[in-house]
Image (tube, coloured by chain):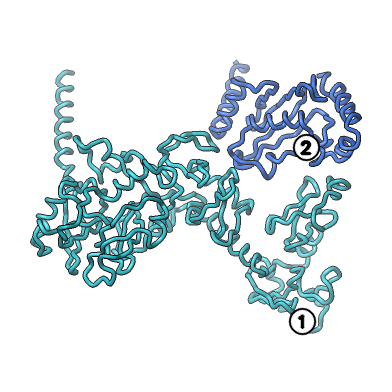
Chain colours: A blue, B cyan
Amino acid sequence: MSGYSAEVKVAETIAYKMVSLPRRIIKETQRLLQEPVPGISAVPDDSNARYFHVIVTGPDDSPFEGGLFRLELFLPEDYPMSAPKVRFVTKIYHPNIDRLGRICLDILKDKWSPALQIRTVLLSIQALLSAPNPDDPLANDVAELWKVDEAEAIRNAKEWTRRYAMDN
Amino acid sequence: MFLLDFFWSLWESITHILTFSRNPQNNKLSIHVKSNTGSSVDVDLDPQWDIGTLKEAIAPKIGLPADDMEIILAGKSLDDSTTIAECDLGEQSVLHAVKSHGQRQRRSRPLNQIMSDLVEENDATLTTVSEVPENQDSVQPPVADSEEKQQKNAHFYVYCSVCMTKSTGNPATPLKPKEGKLRVRCFSCKSGAIQLDSDPASWSDVLEPARVSGDCQEQGCSDGPVAWAEFFFKCAEHVPKSENESAAVPLYLIRANSRSTPCLACMDVLDTVVVFSCAHTICLDCFNDYMTSKIRERKFVLDDNVGYSLPCPVGCEGSLITEIHHFRLLAPNLYNLYQQFATEDFVLKSGGVLCPHPNCGMGIYPDDDCNTVRCTCGYVFCKRCLQGNHIGDCDNAVDILTGLSPSYTIDPSRAAQSKWDEASHRSIRAGTKPCPKCRTATERAGGCMHMVCTRCDFEWCWVCQTSWTRSCMGSHWFG
């Protein structure tokens, strides 16, 4: 009996949270779960529907191929008027991603528009893995090496992918 | 049981008959008819009447035979077979009765219907059409045999200073636009007794003066048959207190969503939307969220021609909102903020400074050759560093306010009341750094060293306190 009422309570809590959630977020979440983007999974947290656990697979023919990269994505209070906050949780060797996992991507900053979605943001991040841009760096030492010795940088990226993104 | 049912249905039919027979009386409209000779008649009329019946009714009072009379509404001479209901008149509307010219080609349909035709042909440049909302039944009774087309109306939305500045209770509640009606008058004598030579074909024709010509039939008008038309808007949601009430401002980006375009932000398809010049479409609620978020971030743009405005949410080139009355839809407390930021940005952009004293913020245009600025609030400050008036250069300033200068005294009681006491002065100094460009005290709550000033948009480095560079990014981006 006590177990049953606890379950009811959890269900009520989730229902309450869903009610207070804007319809746009509910729709986006449903679509992400029903028609996932190939190579990307985004699942809302059980206790916070604005917090997503994201896994992006390293694109083929990139130094990140074969890796599974975990990210966290948070939809702030005034989403979609302001951009989602996204961060790599898995360590990654990339000129546009710093050691704390922060991502240098214009659509997450000043080029954000409410017409973009979680889906488009994650696709852009996946594209950033295929096409690193060392001229607009966030991790400066990585960017430097990427420009001076691209082969060495790619070796490092593959090594980090093998070490941090393949075990889990 | 059967008996009960029988009485119930009887009761229903009685109430039905009662409401049915009462309806026409409720639909009576009080309007004014003005003649171009100066006389004016008040008429109570039934919306089912046609213009011919109206002419017969007013002919004796106006002193003009019905056959010789033309009724003008919004630049159009109305055909005898047009019904009052089709004209979409509100209470206390004004019609103009003039002596017929005879040779003039009759135009049969009122302007609101002409506009809806144009709208359908010219959707992108003008506006869109929608079905008449259900709650308009009192104005437009359901006419059984009316064509489908006549149930359509061009809908205009306006900012009405009469309806929308009343206190709505909660100053944090966004406002809704009011429905508006397009009207026209003579540019020269402002009389409504003008017949248009052609219909407006675009929003420019409506919004800019002297684009459509007309024949003004007001006696004594200097322009007469070669007049220019001047379009204006009326709020459809209140009965005008006087004929000269100031016009409503058209919020022409707000339209009925005839193409069922989903809102770019919430993705729902809603009845009323804001369509930007780049065709991006957002619903009214999301438009308000967009304005609210941008005003809180102080991210409006001060444009020399337009004023303090916003582009479309996607940021398209050339999509700036040119009618800033759209921002009147902001919740009143945020609209106050909009006015404040707009004024401050204008003062700063045109070479002024804002008094840094708490709760003052007065805009001042200082002399070019003197660094000391005295505000009307009594505060004296340096125009370069916006700190209290000091001797010497700003970096090693000696604050005169702290009492080091014999030439300056402060009233102790006033100093005690002031929030600008020494302790808060010190903690602001310790916890903030001034923007290198506009000197706004800035607190870094976290994140990287790359600062963007919320007041002047200057990008600067928290460590160097100069503009942000690649080398800042390389050596101390995160401290």
Crowd rating for badge 2 (residues with CA inside 10 Å; few <14, some 14–19, many 20+): some
Residue at the bottom extreme? B407
The amino acid type found where label 2 is placed reads: Arg
> Where is residue B473 shown, x and y percent of the image?
83, 47
Q: Is residue A158 above or below residue B58?
A: above
Residue sitting at x 10%, y 62%: B64
> Which image quadrant for residue A62?
top right
Residue located beneath label 1 in the image:
B408
Foreground pick, B214 / B344: B214
How many labels sit on residues? 2
| Up-down relation of residue A14 to residue A114 (above or below) | above
| Rendered residue at 19%/35% (across/down) | B145
Q: Residue furthest top?
A: A1
| Distance CA(mark 1)–CA(mark 2) | 52 Å
Subunit that carries the residue with mark 2: A
Measuring 90% from the left and 37% from the top, which residue is drawn there? A148
Q: Looking at the picture, which amino acid does disc 1 mark? A: Tyr
Q: Secondary structure at mark 2?
A: loop
Callout 1–callout 2 Cβ contact below 8 Å: no
Q: Chain of mark 1?
A: B
Q: Is residue B390 above or below residue B32?
A: below
Q: Quadrant of residue B378?
A: bottom right
Does residue B443 appear anywhere in the picture? yes
Location of mark 2 (residue): A102
Tell me if A17 is positioned left or right of B90 in this view.
Answer: right
Residue B304 place in picture, x, y as percent:
58, 62
Q: Nearer the viewer, residue B423 or B131?
A: B131
The reply to whether residue B412 is visible in this rendering is no
Q: Position of residue B271 (x, y in %)?
A: 42, 38
The circle drawn on residue A16 is: none
Secondary element at image label 1: loop
Residue B1 coordinates in the image, percent (x, y): 18, 18
